[in-house]
Image (cartoon, rainbow, N blue to C red):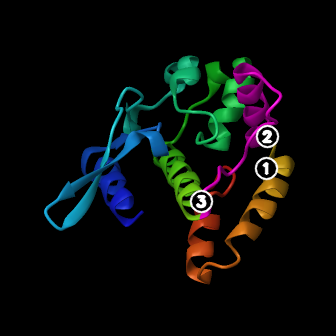
Amino acid sequence: ILQLFNITYYMHVTKGYAHLDIKTENIGLIELDSTSDIRLFDFGNVRYSQSVVSSDFQDVEKMGTIGYMAPELCRLLLNKKARASYQIPESKASRCDMFSIGVVAFSLLTNRPLASAPENMNDMQKQAYLCHLFADDDRYQRRLKRSMEKLDLLDENIQTLINGLLRFDPE
């Protein structure tokens, strides 16, 4: 996770970009002699964070993967009218990546997704279910509280870190 923070720090601070599709499937492990490094893949959704404005949100469907997507992006996905007038501050574009890192950390530490849809749903229904769950602050907070209980055996600092990363629409 520390290496993932270092990669995103480099992207955000040094280069000014937000990845907007950080997920376990886009992280690779590279073995170098006796050490291992991670690599971040799939830069198809990258946005220059200092210029992420309303026009970018017309294609919010292409800005991440539901289940890893920050709640504020899920809200936009569900509200087409809001997309035309929405402007994301540059700091929030980076925060979307931080949320995704929180989901990745949770998944790696618990070996389960942060949220999942009922198995009897098809893929489209599952995506809609998760998007509605993440976009609704009350439902999301209840789900997060239940999910965080799965981390009770972990160090308190790790719990605090993941909880901070998974905050709903941080300011």
Q: Confirm or deny contact between disc 2 and disc 1 (CB under 8 A).
A: yes
Three-letter amino acid code of the residue under disc 2 = Leu
**Viewer can see residue 22:** no
Q: Nearer the viewer, residue 66 or 52?
A: 66
In the rendered image, which residue does mark 2 sit on? 133
Residue extending farthest to the bottom is 156
Numbered tag placed on residue 2 in the rendering: none
Horizontally, residue 106 falls left or right of residue 53, namely right
Residue extending farthest to the left is 33
Question: Where in the figure is residue 170, as x and y percent of width and height?
Answer: 63, 55
Q: Nearer the viewer, residue 94 or 68?
A: 68
In the rendered image, the vertical position of residue 36 relative to residue 92, given as above or below: below
Residue at 69 percent of width and 52 percent of height: 168
* Residue 46 in magenta stretch: no
Three-letter amino acid code of the residue under disc 1 = Tyr
Residue at 82 percent of width and 36 percent of height: 118
Q: Nearer the viewer, residue 69 or 24?
A: 24
Q: CA distance from mark 1 to mark 3?
A: 15 Å
Q: Which residues are magenta?
A: 110-135
In the rendered image, which residue does mark 3 sit on? 106
In the rendered image, which residue does mark 1 sit on? 140
Q: CA distance from mark 3 to mark 2?
A: 17 Å
Horizontally, residue 68 falls left or right of residue 132, namely left
Q: Secondary structure at mark 3?
A: helix
Q: Nearer the viewer, mark 3 or mark 2?
A: 3
Question: Where in the figure is residue 112, as x and y percent of width and height?
Answer: 64, 53
- Using a 10 Å C-alpha cutoff, classify the residue at mark 2 as few (fewer than 14 neighbours), some (14 to 19) or many (20 or more): many
Q: Nearer the viewer, mark 1 or mark 3?
A: 3
Question: Where in the figure is residue 136, as x and y percent of width and height?
Answer: 81, 42
